[in-house]
């Protein structure tokens, strides 16, 4: 057994063996900065009846209102006609909202200066003010210049970034051993938010754009304010809660997949058949009902025990996992073996609590990452490697999504709206699968950057697939680009937390988020746009009878642009492989800590 010796101050924990006590000279000491515990005491002020699962449910509802930046296509044509903008001006206004990510840097600093609820309220106010200016301008109640509209759009999106920062940080703190899965579930709601609000708009708001603008202005702000005080760190013993957490996360994941498949089916039906208003209302109510089940699912304690045979029949793998875990702990070890293992693998901390060897390693990893400063991360090569990887992959994905309507038109496809829907739904799946899949890889002893490498390779292959110009490959490519793009936003914050420490996540994650925005603008306007204009001019010279301006038909319109994006992604693949190699030692410690 280990002995407890008070050799450190109140901010550290010392683990000393009997040999060290006898010799009087410690042979090794172990320090852990109590960041999470101090923050819990500061925010909670003591024990709370509300646990981390209710916090997760509240965060999921917020994130379901957080992806409205992807709904610009719904009202962009209305903006163009109402304000008499050119297509270039309309695109510039759409790009302005993406630069709201700049406010994410401020949100990262605010997270450590103020309580979480204050950052959320700031985000709610920014969202309300930013979108209100757009709403009043487009309804004729306010006269705004173009640049003022751009700033307002960025402010509204920046408010969503404040909420996103707080939710991600809190979830990373509350679910340390399930980082990837928890963030994936959270981000999957963001991926579906646009589809959900559009379904409500089409079913209940008579497809009037001003009504839609009012909806996305008011509803998210109200949701943020109402749920702000539920988003905070919660104390939890993850070792005893492990099996219950696995069951809850899998149940939530199942319902998210069901919702995604349901929306995919609705989209296909609307594309094939003429759907009347009553059926649209039914689809919208069904969507909201499934969303309600998803939000309630995290609150169900031990779903296997509650639902029993029903889940065993529908999802037998879930029960097999639970049964295997139960027998591992109950049958494979006798009571005496467990006592001996406990005496060997545990030590006492200064406050008298028993600490396992895995917790010792986890604390050692924490102390190493927490000892590094923001400047250490910024001047190191690892942060810029992952920034380039995410920027090249997600930036290429954004460029493809921004031009997908023109890509479909170039190959004379008349189902462009379906492509956009496929991208949105598969983006949700990408956010979800990458979280659960990366956690699974971690349990197998592989590092999380391997999952990032797989996503980067998928984006590279997607560029090659789309460059063929085949309509079938457009369907496949739209699914792959959504899957890969969504995965970046689950993997990036989780990897940053593990490599650089929780203390740096808020600022580094938002700084990293600027990369895809900037690179997508360059790739879209300066690469794809330039090559498209060049091909359209050549096409017009060879087809004198065409009446359309700046039109181009054929695979050559986007072939070279997409191949250029593929080249950027391939460089990102090499950079990601290097990053995975450089962080292998960090992940060997992380894997042992959670094994």
Image: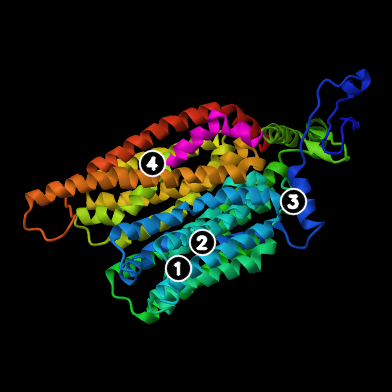
Q: Residues within 10 Å of mark 4 (few under 14, many from 20)?
A: many
Establish if 581 lies above or below 170.
Answer: above
Residue to which mark 3 is pinned: 236
Q: Nearer the viewer, mark 2 or mark 3?
A: 2
**Rendering coords of residue 81 (x, y %):** 30, 70
Q: Secondary structure at mark 1?
A: helix
Q: Secondary structure at mark 4?
A: helix
User: Which is nearer the N-term, disc 4 or disc 2?
Assistant: 2
Residue to which mark 4 is pinned: 458
Task: Please say if the residues under marks 4 and 2 sit with CB atoms less than 8 Å apart.
Answer: no
Viewer can see residue 558? no
Q: Residue at x 62, y 56 (%)?
A: 248
Q: Is residue 535 left or right of residue 369?
A: left
Establish if 501 lies above or below 219.
Answer: above
As drawn, the label of residue 134 is 1
Q: Is residue 421 left or right of residue 241?
A: left
User: Which is nearer the N-term, disc 2 or disc 3?
Assistant: 2
Task: Please say if the residues under marks 3 and 4 sit with CB atoms less than 8 Å apart.
Answer: no
Residue to which mark 2 is pinned: 156
Q: Nearer the viewer, mark 4 or mark 2?
A: 2
Q: CA distance from mark 4 to mark 2?
A: 32 Å
Q: Secondary structure at mark 3?
A: loop
Task: Please say if the residues under marks 2 and 1 sit with CB atoms less than 8 Å apart.
Answer: yes
User: Which is nearer the N-term, disc 2 or disc 1?
Assistant: 1
């Amino acid at each position: 057994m280990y002995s407890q010796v008070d050799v450190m101050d109140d901010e550290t924990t010392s683990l000393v063996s009997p040999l060290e006590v006898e010799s009087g000279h410690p042979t090794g000491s172990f320090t852990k900065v109590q960041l999470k515990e101090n923050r819990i005491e500061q925010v909670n002020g003591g024990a709370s009846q509300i646990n981390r699962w209710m916090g997760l449910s509240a965060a999921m509802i917020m994130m379901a209102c957080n992806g409205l930046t992807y709904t610009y296509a719904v009202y962009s044509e209305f903006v163009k006609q109402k304000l008499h903008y050119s297509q270039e001006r309309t695109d510039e206004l759409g790009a302005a909202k993406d630069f709201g990510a700049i406010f994410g840097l401020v949100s990262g600093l605010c997270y450590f200066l103020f309580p979480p609820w204050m950052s959320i309220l700031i985000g709610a106010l920014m969202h309300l003010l930013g979108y209100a200016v757009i709403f009043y301008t487009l309804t004729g109640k306010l006269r705004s210049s173009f640049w003022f509209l751009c700033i307002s759009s960025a402010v509204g999106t920046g408010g969503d970034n404040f909420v996103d920062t707080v939710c991600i940080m809190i979830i990373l703190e509350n679910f340390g051993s399930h980082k990837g899965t928890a963030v994936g579930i959270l981000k999957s709601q963001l991926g579906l938010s646009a589809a959900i609000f559009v379904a409500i708009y089409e079913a209940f708001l008579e497809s009037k754009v001003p009504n839609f603008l009012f909806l996305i202005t008011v509803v998210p702000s109200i949701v943020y304010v109402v749920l702000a005080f539920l988003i905070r760190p919660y104390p939890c013993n993850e070792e005893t809660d492990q099996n219950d957490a696995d069951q809850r996360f899998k149940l939530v994941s199942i319902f998210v997949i069901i919702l995604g498949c349901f929306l995919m089916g609705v989209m296909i039906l609307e594309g094939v058949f003429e759907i009347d208003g009553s059926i649209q209302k039914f689809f919208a109510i069904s969507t909201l009902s499934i969303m309600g089940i998803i939000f309630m699912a995290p609150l169900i304690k031990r779903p296997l025990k509650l639902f029993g045979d029903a889940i065993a029949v529908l999802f037998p793998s879930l029960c097999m996992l639970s049964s295997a875990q139960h027998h591992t702990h109950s049958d494979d070890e006798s009571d005496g073996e467990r006592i001996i293992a406990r005496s060997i693998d545990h030590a006492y901390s200064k406050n008298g609590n028993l600490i396992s060897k895995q917790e010792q390693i986890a604390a050692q990893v924490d102390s190493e990452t927490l000892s590094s400063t923001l400047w250490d991360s910024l001047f190191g090569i690892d942060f810029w490697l992952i920034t380039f990887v995410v920027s090249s992959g997600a930036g290429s994905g954004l460029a493809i999504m921004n031009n997908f309507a023109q890509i479909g038109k170039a190959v004379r496809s008349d189902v462009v709206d379906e492509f956009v829907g496929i991208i949105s739904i598969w983006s949700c799946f990408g956010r979800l699968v990458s979280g659960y899949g990366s956690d699974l890889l971690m349990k197998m002893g592989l590092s999380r950057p391997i999952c990032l490498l797989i996503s980067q390779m998928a984006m590279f292959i997607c560029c090659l697939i789309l460059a063929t110009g085949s309509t079938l490959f457009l369907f496949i490519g739209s699914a792959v680009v959504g899957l890969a793009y969504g995965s970046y936003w689950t993997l990036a914050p989780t990897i940053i937390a593990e490599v650089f420490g929780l203390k740096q996540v808020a600022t580094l994650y938002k700084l990293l988020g600027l990369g895809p925005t900037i690179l997508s603008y360059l790739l879209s306007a300066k690469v794809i746009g330039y090559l498209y204009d060049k091909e359209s001019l050549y096409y017009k010279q060879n087809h004198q009878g065409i009446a359309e301006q700046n039109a181009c038909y054929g695979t050559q319109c986007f072939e070279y642009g997409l191949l250029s994006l593929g080249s950027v992604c391939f460089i990102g693949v090499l950079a990601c492989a290097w990053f995975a190699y450089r962080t292998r030692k960090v992940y060997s410690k992380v894997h042992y800590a959670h094994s």
